[in-house]
Image (spheres, rainbow, N blue to C red):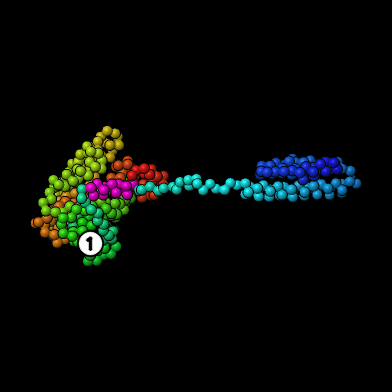
Amino acid sequence: MQDKIERLREEIDAFKADSKDQVESFRIKYLGSKGALKGLFSDFKSVPNELRREFGQKLNELQNRAKTRLEELRDSVEDQGSETQEAPDLTRPAKPTPLGSRHPVSIVRNEIVSIFSGIGFSVEEGPEIEDDWHNFTALNFPPEHPARDMQDTFFIEKGDNDIALRTHTSSVQVRALERAQPPVRIVMPGRVFRNEDISARSHCIFHQIEGLYIDRGVSFADMKQTLLHFVREFFTEKAEIRLRPSYFPFTEPSAEVDVYWGLETETDYRITKGTGWLEIMGCGMVDPNVLENCNIDSKEYSGFAFGMGVERIAMLRYGIPDIRLLFENDQRFLEQFKTAY
Ligand code: PHE
């Protein structure tokens, strides 16, 4: 017993460690539940009574010594750790900074705007909170006319000239025409608001791009050719459009523009309702009343306007099945547009 204690003490004092693993093996070897000290404590049972006091003391001392040594070893590898840690290599390239991506609505909006800037349209913006005059009256919506119900309005203030969230970007047409005499050739992107139930196909907030071209002698044929140019730039060179008669209070005649989408897949059938054609915007020749409301001589000038929903076009382009995805800002959705533009 005496020998064993002495030998162990020497071993413990001499133990060297230069890693955390080695410190741990020290702990297991001497202080662990099956370690050397446990072994000695069980040998202690057979020590004759008269020697118990002496050996008990020695064993306790040894155990304390082992614990102190464990701490010393721990400290030594920790110090070493910090000394041996390599200085950072400052010439290495930094970790890549994660980049965000453009929102699909912005990508599509930018692209549409850039197609029109290519043919001489400049960009105008107007307020999202509008008065009745700019959103309705100047656009030839007579007071109490049922056409106002086409667009469920979020009112902010009721009065002679109601204040509301604009229901379309056509209000910017009025602001632009009040400010400048023709020629006017502008696109007007912006957010619009309608009091509609939110579903996979419609939202109460969405984006439109409005276009307006007013000058001497602008004809319906000019409108058709401009829109065909846009559709061919945006979709494919071979795209075809058709104009279907429609109604808007501020244009006469008015039309809906359909683009030929094709009928090759089941999805094509579903989204075109089996016709192969998809409606992408409204358009028409600006009603003379609108020009007069903005102090523009409707005998001298004419022009066309059009308006399209950006979300709808983004959904078509990227095959997005639910408009709500465009408003939830889910990273897993947005990250897919990293390389889009
Ligand atoms: N303002 C119309 C709408 O929101 C679209 C439109 C714009 C139609 C310009 C014709 C001319 O539905």
Q: Residue furthest top?
A: 264
Residue at the spot 9% in from the left edge and 56% down from the top edge: 300
Residue at the spot 68% in from the left edge and 48% down from the top edge: 76
Is 307 part of what is drawn in magenta? no
Q: From the viewer's perspective, is residue 289 above or below residue 322?
A: below
SS type, badge 1: helix
- The image position of residue 88, as x and y in percent, is 55, 48
Residue at the spot 71% in from the left edge and 49% down from the top edge: 71
User: Is residue 6 left or right of 31 when viewed as pictured?
Assistant: right
Closer-to-camera residue (139/15):
15
Q: Which residues are magenta?
A: 104-118
Tell me if the residue at label 1 has its CB under 8 Å from ligand 1: no
In the rendered image, which residue does mark 1 sit on? 132
Closer-to-camera residue (193/13):
13
Residue type marked 1: Asp
**Which secondary structure type mostly characterizes the magenta part of the structure?**
helix
Closer-to-camera residue (323/93):
93
- The image position of residue 137, as x and y in percent, is 19, 60
Is 106 part of what is drawn in magenta? yes
Q: Residues within 10 Å of mark 1 (few under 14, many from 20)?
A: many
- The image position of residue 307, as x and y in percent, is 22, 50
Residue at the spot 50% in from the left edge and 46% down from the top edge: 91
User: Is residue 330 left or right of 205 when viewed as pictured?
Assistant: right
Quadrant for the N terminus, please: top right
